[in-house]
Amino acid sequence: MEEKAKKPIKGIKIRSMNVKMIILSCVLYIILLVATINAAGQYRNMVSNTEDYVACERDAALVREGSDYLTEQVRLYTVTKDPQYMEAYFTEVYTTRRRDAALEKMQAFDVSDGALAYLQTAHENSNKLMEQEIYAMRLTAAAQKTDETELAEDVRNMALTAQDADLSPEEMIAKAQDMVFGTSYQEAKESIMSNISRFIDSIMGDTMGKQQDSAQALKKTMTTQQILISILFAENIMTFILISILVVKPLDIYIENIGEKERLQITGSYEFKYLALTYNNIYELNANNEAMLSYRAEHDALTGIINRGAFDRLRQILKTQQAPLALLIIDVDKFKQVNDGYGHETGDRVLRKVAKLLEESFRSSDYAARIGGDEFAVIVTEAAPEMKPAIVKKISGINEKLMNPSDGLPKVSLSVGGAFSPNGFEDMLYKNADMALYQVKENGRCGCRFYEELQEAASTEG
């Protein structure tokens, strides 16, 4: 990175640009979302106002239908004297209740006091007209001398005036019919319908005003949406242009450079310039590292990890480096008994299992190798003696899995000898690790010891 230190990198940082674009987009989208929600609310208001008006029209029609039905039944009763029409009349009044239900619904609408006054007047007049209709039915029943038990409760409870009680049956019928067919009756009905029509007209006026307000607000909101969408579109175009200049173009150049096996041009965003400088440094060191990397192609056919030949070449490479490392020499305990007792196929499976556990337990920067029939080795890079507890823990974990198999394979264990080197793969490193392995085997196998421990023990005894 000397070139980087000599020549500071200048350029637009993609991350900074991305954060700014994201923040701007989020703000615009939030405003757009609020505008959309507002537009939806205005639309719902328009729909609600329309639905209210339609409901008022429908309820007004129900009032007319219910009123006309009551008129029809009371007239039929006064003419035919058939009790079924009285029964139908009160069924409408107390059960079907089209008129009252519709009036109650209309009272629940959000309308002005003036409009509500029309509805209340219509309701009061309707109740008064109903009393007149019941009185007419009472006159008809009295003229027919109908048994009191056959009369509806409201008719039975309606008392005739003394003057009407003295009328003859014909006069009672005539008066009853006049009460429901006469001009005053029709005028009263027309007054009720007139008040309901005024109520509807008032609601329509209120609704039209609300619709106009909602439409105006909706228009403003949609204009805001169009402006925001235009800004977002412009932002997307700007982002596309910046990405093309700072990302796509440098990538095309880098692909061409790599294809030609050339150094990368210092171009594009800050990150790409940094990447180019790093790549160029690695590119210059690549020739020295090819020998080390080539060993990865030499793997053991059975276990998939590197073989003895690759391991020996790796030892030679690491001799030239001054980095600290550790070497582990590993034997599978009593492996011959596994081969003899379970067969070579099972033995091969055990070896593959051991290799897999070694690869999984150690880092990707470490090197696990099969160096003999049931012998393995692990080179632990950048390792100092302080790492002994961590290495011992890894080996203990592997032995725990091998001693408690869940895959049907026989129990095995590992004996491990290790040694550390502060300056690459020293000549005595393999011998030292092998001596530590020997001590593990002599003390019952299934464990891990380090050459440094042997030295410390020897020093203590001395």
Image: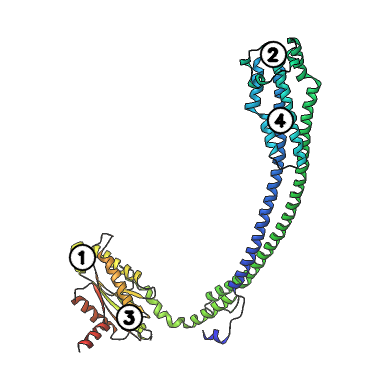
The numbered mark, 1 or 3, whose residue comes first in the sequence reads: 3
Residue at position x 33%, y 69% from top? 304
* Mark 2 secondary-structure assignment: helix
Of the numbered discs in the image, which one, if any, rests on residue 63?
A: 4
Distance between the alpha carbons at the discs numbered 4 and 3: 98 Å
The numbered mark, 1 or 2, whose residue comes first in the sequence reads: 2
Of the numbered discs in the image, which one, if any, rests on residue 355?
A: none
Camera-side mark, 1 or 2:
2
Residue at position x 74%, y 38% from top? 116
Read off the residue under disc 1. Answer: 338
Locate residue 97, reporting x and y percent: 65, 28
Q: Nearer the viewer, residue 334 or 305?
A: 334
Locate residue 94, reporting x and y percent: 63, 26
Read off the residue under disc 2. Answer: 142
Of the residues shown, which amino acid type is indicated by label 2?
A: Ala
* Mark 1 secondary-structure assignment: helix
Residue at position x 31%, y 83% from top? 420
Question: In this view, which residue lies farthest toward the front?
Answer: 162
Q: Nearer the viewer, residue 45 or 382?
A: 45
Residue at position x 66%, y 26% from top? 93
Question: In this view, which residue lies farthest toward the bottom?
Answer: 462
